[in-house]
Image: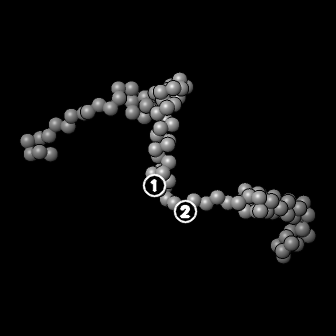
Amino acid sequence: MNFIDKAISMMSPGWAVSRLRSRAVIKAYEAAIPTRTHKIKRENRNANQLNQIAGKSLREQARWFDNNHDLVVGALDKMEERIIGAKGIIVEPQPLTVAGT
């Protein structure tokens, strides 16, 4: 216990116990601390390099699911409708003035 914890324990023992319990829980949080059995997996490549490597596989899997899985077809159709729009991609003319602007 540090000085603050000792002072708190004199004033409010329940609060001091709560602080110590919280500190123990944080120390015991396994995912944040590398151990002998839990090695942290880090990635040294940037996002573009990772996408370049995995892009072909992900693209092929997505096409296979789109062709062969009804639930995926429905989900992708809904996403397409909500992202692109019900009418699809349409060309909207932008008439110019005589000055070309």
Near-viewer residue (43 or 53): 53
Left or right for 45, reference 87? right
Mark 2 element type? loop
Q: Determine contact: label 1, label 2, CB under 8 Å.
A: no
Near-viewer residue (82 or 34): 34
Where does label 2 land, which residue? 44
- Taking the spot 77% from the left edge, 58% from the top edge, the residue there is 37
Left or right for 83, reference 100? right
Amino acid type at mark 1: Asn
Alpha carbons under labels 1 and 2: distance apart: 12 Å
Mark 1: give few (<14), some (14-19) or many (20+) Cα within 10 Å.
few
Near-viewer residue (50 or 18): 50
Residue 83 image point, x, y percent: 42, 34
Residue 32 image point, x, y percent: 71, 59
Residue 17 visible, this orientation: yes
Q: Quadrant of residue 10?
A: bottom right
Mark 2: give few (<14), some (14-19) or many (20+) Cα within 10 Å.
few
- Taking the spot 90% from the left edge, 68% from the top edge, the residue there is 9
Indicate the quadrant containing the C terminus: top left, top right, bottom left or bottom right: top left
Q: Which mark is residue 36?
A: none
Left or right for 97, reference 79? left
Q: Quadrant of residue 92?
A: top left
Q: Residue furthest top?
A: 70
Count of numbered tags: 2
- Taking the spot 11% from the left edge, 45% from the top edge, the residue there is 100
Residue 75 visible, this orientation: no
- Taking the spot 49% from the left edge, 35% from the top edge, the residue there is 62
Where does label 1 land, which residue? 48
Amino acid type at mark 2: Asn
Near-viewer residue (22 or 86): 86
Residue 82 image point, x, y percent: 44, 31
